[in-house]
Structures are given as C-alpha cells and as structure tokens.
Amino acid sequence: MKKAVILLSGGIDSATCCGIARRDGYELYTMSFRYGQRHYVELEAAEQLARYFNVAYHSVVNIDLRAFGGSALTSETAIPKNRVPSGEENDIPVTYVPARNTIFLSFALGWAEVLDSRDIFVGVNAVDYSGYPDCRPEFIAAYQNMARLATRAGVEGRGVTIHAPLQELSKGEIIRLGDTCGVDYALTHSCYDPAPDGGACGECDSCLIRKRGFEEAGVADPTRYA
Amino acid sequence: MKKAVILLSGGIDSATCCGIARRDGYELYTMSFRYGQRHYVELEAAEQLARYFNVAYHSVVNIDLRAFGGSALTSETAIPKNRVPSGEENDIPVTYVPARNTIFLSFALGWAEVLDSRDIFVGVNAVDYSGYPDCRPEFIAAYQNMARLATRAGVEGRGVTIHAPLQELSKGEIIRLGDTCGVDYALTHSCYDPAPDGGACGECDSCLIRKRGFEEAGVADPTRYA
C-alpha cells in the first residue's frame, strides 16, 4: 500500500485532503504541529480526525515559531473580526505566519523520506487565502521542484510529489468534494479565536469563510458556535 | 546596516560564513538548532562563535527531528570511523539527516522575513559532502527560487538571496578564506563523536576532513583532540 504524508491542521481543507488520499488508496500518515498557537483546539480536532480516518500514524511535532514572532497567530496581536478578506494578492492578513507552510512541508518531506513515501498532501487553496504567499500554486510548484533535489529519493531518481488537490477550489467546492469522500466536518475546527469550551466565535475571517462555504456547498453546517 | 541571517552549526563552514558576512558589512543574526543531536558540544561552539563575532542576536531553535528518526546523528546507530568518504553523489552517509538543510533554511527564511533581512548565509559545500543531497548547488538554487515565492517579501517584489559562498571550495580553501576574514577556528567544533570533555575523536569522517583541511590550507590546526 502506498503511503501518503498529510499535513493535518484540523481544519476543513486538511480534513478534505485526508478524505481524498483515503479515497485514492493511500495509507495515511498525518502530521500536526504544536507551534506556539494561541490555542490547541485545532490540535485536538486533528487528533480526532486522525482517529476517524484510522491513520497508520499521527505525528505531532513541537516547533517554536514564537522564536521569531511576527504573526497574530503566535503573538498577542488582536485577531480581526467581521472583516471580509479582499482576496487581493498583496493584502496579506496579519494572521499570516512567516514561512509556516515552508517549514511544515519541510518536516513532511523529512518524514516522507524516512517512511519511503513519495506523496505529500497539503490543503492549501489559492481562492480563499490568496493573501498568504505560501498558499499560491507557483509556490507549491517551486517547493516540489526543490523537494526533488533535497532528498535521497531525489538523488536516486525517485521524485516526491506535493499534492495540493484543493488548490483551485472554492471553500464550497472543497466541502462538496469532502462530503463525497465521507469527511465528517463536525470533527473539524476553523476558528482563530475559540471560546474556552472550543466553540467557534463565528466572527473571525476563518469562521466567516467556513460559514459561507457550507452555504455555497449546500451542506448542513455542523459547526458548534460559542 | 543590512542584516544577514546565518545558519551557525559551530563547525568550520558556518564559522567561515560569519567571517565572510562580517567582512561584507552585514549585521549578523545567527541561528542554531537543538534538534535531538547526540551531543551539544556543537551548540556550545556556536554560542562562543556568536559571542566572538559580536552578533546582533543568536537564536537557538528547538526542533524535534527524532520525531521521524532515520539518521545516525539523531539515533543510536554507530558512527562510522576511519572511513574515507568517496565523494560519489549516490554514496549518502548514514550521518545524513532527512531534509535537515531544508528544515533549517525554512526557519532562517521565517526569521529573515520578520527581521526584514534579504540575505541568508549557509555554509554548504559540494566538494567534501557531495553525498548529502541538500548540500548540492542545484538544491540551493531551487531553494532560493522557492523562497522568493514563499514570503511576503517575495510577493512585494523583494527577493531573498541564499548565499552559499563555500559551495565550490575545498575544506582547505574554506579555511584559508576564513583565516583572511579573522575566523578563530579554535572556537569551532566538527567531531561527530566527541569525548565527554568536548575533545575531538580524530577518527570520524568529520574529524578526518577537518584534519586534511588544515593541512591543505597550511594553517595550524587548533583542534583539541581527546
């Protein structure tokens, strides 16, 4: 059985990647990060999803992005509320974490090499989050090119593929696709600023995009709001 | 004053990069990693070098490469002794750590973005360690291409440059160059398997290459052997 390493944040996109990889016959190896987030609700969601998808191994890597600061997601800057993201390329949200996807993919690459896996899945999509430079298709393509040169597998002529199957999809399309793959979105978490009991705020960028996504998909929204 | 982020392992190559960057007028920001190494002698060497070069900030990042195993440097596999590296591309040493340079460069990239630095220095060289895929010039070029797409600076049209000034130099040439830049090699550490007091074993690949380097350079070898 071919193995896939999947970056699993616990949100809609990465959960959908699990569903797609399972549908496509991969054995799943999921990887999450404890990186100095404000809250760990998303890590709990990732763990539940890993159990739901019956993955071969769920790895949680400790890294310290606070070491260089610079983002609302890892510091005490206020999270913007009820703001509609413009989708403009150079309107980079304050929730952008410097080089985060580059760092996460690099850990996935190391793990894939050890597992002898040639397939890494990442749930980036350029439509909703075009403000994040490291979610763009040209970034993923350049990453894959670099990854093929970085590893033993590459030297031995076996490439690594970075799968970003959601790249061109809207949030609604992602949810519809995941729905057909049997993803249970009740287990996912999106909110940047959850209540202590894990309930979603319903007002941050991420909650607004999620809400619109379920509407667009015509799928019942299972989100538990605070 | 322009800022440079320098990956500082505490060895000859990264120390030489510090000397070059200082000579070229950069303010130095050095970054080391506690990544589950067998020993921390190299981290102490990095700290001493940071002090010697009077850097603006020396950052030590905790990451857990043991999470996916796979290398003699982070597990209990025996370190090979008195083996002469062949220099063949597909003879990858067991001391290779999967995706290590990819991961280290990614942290440097995040820090550079926060510091608004456009220059990252890495001491890879293709001559002595051609067995490590992530030390090859084509890897560095591909990494830089990816890095320019990964960050806010890239989106805003300001690129990041990955400087690998030692890329084509032999160990002897590196030592001669560093000597002219005032690098104190007595502060550096190379041994994969040091004695408890930090003395070098004199027999591992890294010690052998270092010894030959000083001979080739015609520079007195300041190494303290166990």
Image (tube, coloured by chain):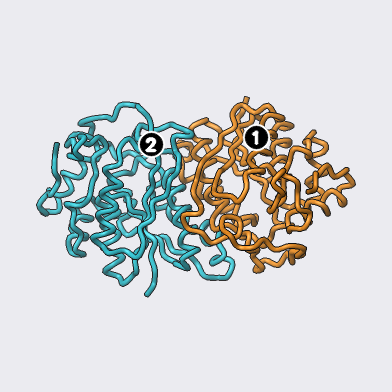
Chain colours: A orange, B cyan
**Left or right placement of residue B125 versus residue A164 in this view:** left
Q: Residues within 10 Å of mark 2 (few under 14, many from 20)?
A: some
What quarter of the picture does the C terminus of chain B occupy?
A: top left
Secondary element at image label 2: loop
Q: Which residue is mark 2?
A: B90
User: What secondary structure is found at the residue carrying circle 1?
Assistant: helix
Chain of the residue displaying label 2: B
Q: Does label 2 lie on the same chain as label 1? A: no
Q: Which residue corresponds to the image point at 36% horizontal and 51% vertical from the top-left?
A: B32
Residue type, numbered disc 1: Glu
Q: Nearer the viewer, residue A33 or A152?
A: A33
The dot on residue A47 is 1
Residue B26 to residue A25: above or below: below
Name the foreground residue: B198 vs B159: B198
Question: Count of labels shown?
Answer: 2
Image position of A93 with respect to B140: above or below: below
Which residue extends farthest bottom?
A: B1
The residue positioned 51% from the left and 45% from the top of the image is: A106
Picture coordinates of residue B103 (x, y %)? 46, 47
Q: Chain of mark 1?
A: A
* Left or right: where B77 falls relative to A102: left
